[in-house]
Amino acid sequence: MTDTLRPVATPVAQAPDQGPQKLKRSIGVVGGTLLTLSCVTPASTLFVVVPDLFGTLGTATAVTIAIGSLLCIAVAFCYSELGTLIPSAGGEYAMVSTLAGRLAGWLVFVLSLLVVMIVPPVIAMGTADYLAPIVHLDPSMTGAGVMLLATLAGLLDLRANAWITGIFLVLEVIAAALVAVLGFSHGHRGMGSLVSMEVAGADGHADTVTAMLVVSGLAIALFITQGFSTAVYLSEELENPRRSVARTVLATLAISSVIILVPVVAITLGASDLSELTGGDIGSMVTAWSNTAVGTFVSLCVALAIINAGIVMVIQNSRVLFASARDKAWPEPVNAVFSKLGRFGSPWVATLAVGVPGALLCFVDLDTLYGVTGVSVTGMYLLVAVAALLSRRGAHRHTAAWRMPLWPAVPVLLIVVLAYILTQQDTSYLLWTGGITAVATLYWALYLRPRKETRWLVSLPEDEQG
């Protein structure tokens, strides 16, 4: 049983006789899919994150991403059911709070906040590398500039942002497709190399990639397609959310998996040797397969994709912070500020609150935060799967919602697999994430729980109650 309220009796910064502030429903499945795909950022993921996997997993990279994509189908089923059952801008924390209790929801909120605050600056700092064919820039300064630009775009109307991100998305899909075509047309090895499980060692000779190394890499593989969950953050702004959320989640996962996995297979086959593949310099491979002009074009498309990713991630993050303020997660003055809506219907203070710190994080060493992000995503999915296991008890059994096939087998299997993946992660990453969640638990115990009648009151939009 939870202490969820529907709706909040006295909403933040509003008169008692009014309902909680609601975001405007202005986009359909197509607009939502464009925004969500942009948050997955297929091209920037392919060019920024995947090279690290090539360095660790070599020819096993494609298999690892494929396994991660299959696991994400089960995750997407959970998000689709819970996102239509609990259509809130709070996303994971609203779903988990309603179904698994307020403490579990609070911990999911903290994990999701870790992910959405860390990922944008990490991706943004890669912009300088892909602008290098034209101009040499400082990665930190460039990343901070991208974050500030994304923040300004996030203040605009969501419909306008759907068009902006849609245009950028087309460019990054073209870049990914070009890499795939070039890789397949310059294949140096057969399809059997995809399961050869080899990586170039320090001495240049082939080393075997163990199964445990693949399992460890699954945390990053899950992160690679993680953006499909953005659909549930947009559920208050999607038209007909009971239908649109599930369609947007599943369509985004399918499209993004193809956009990422096909070029990864092509790169694996097209790399001239194992050392080149392990080096992960995709830009150099593209230039070698074609010419400098094509390599420059692809690099510019990737740079635009990163800017696109920043815009969508700032939009997502601001909705999470807006929803947490509306649900009274903070002291009253903070709630009042973060719940303000601007001229275009966007939560402008919350947008600034996530965008400006993101720019500052570009000046911090973020190597360890990659690992923290992988652990956070895995832990967040684990708690969402627990909530999905509880989604058909009591009154929720009869609420109108999209229902996943093979329940409860899907969430049970997901819980077991994700728990095992966590046990295979680097201890330091687990300690960092565990320390942050421990501090969050203290905040819950000392501030939120003693004020359970007035704080952390997760609400649903009045017009969407079952």
Image (cartoon, rainbow, N blue to C red):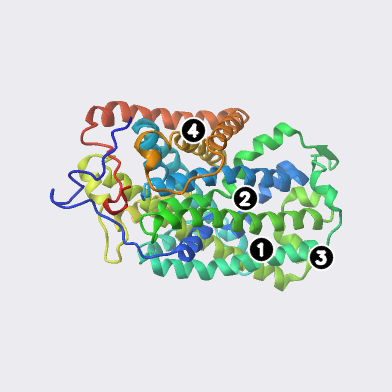
Question: Where in the figure is residue 150, as x and y percent of width and height?
Answer: 43, 61
Secondary structure at numbered mark 2: helix
Q: Is residue 310 shown to the viewer in this render?
A: yes
Cα separation, mark 4 vs mark 2, equals 20 Å
Mark toward the start of the polypeptide (4 vs 2): 2
Q: Quadrant of residue 236?
A: bottom left
Q: Say left or right for 61 vs 271.
A: left
Viewer-nearest of labels 2 and 1?
Answer: 1
In the image, residue 223 sits, relative to residue 255, either above or below, namely: above
User: Label 2: which residue?
Assistant: 49
What is the CA distance from the residue labelled 4 to the residue labelled 3?
A: 43 Å
> Of the residues shown, which amino acid type is indicated by label 1?
Ala
Q: Do the CB atoms of the residues marked 1 and 4 lie less than 8 Å apart?
A: no
Task: Work out how far the residue at label 3 is from the one at label 1, CA to CA, in angstroms.
Answer: 14 Å
Please state which amino acid type lies under the numbered disc 3: Ser
Q: Which residue is mark 4?
A: 433
Question: Residue shown at 44%/44% (left/top)?
Answer: 82
Of helix, strand and loop, which one carries label 3? helix
Pointer 3 local density, CA inside 10 Å: few below 14, some 14–19, many at least 20: few
Q: Which residue is mark 3?
A: 185
Q: CA distance from mark 2 to mark 1?
A: 14 Å
**In the figure, is residue 332 to the left or right of 109?**
left
Q: Are marks 4 and 2 in contact (CB under 8 Å)?
A: no
- Which residue position is annotated with label 1? 176
Residue type, label 4? Thr
Q: Tag 3 or tag 4, which sits nearer the N-term?
A: 3
Residue closest to the far bottom = 293
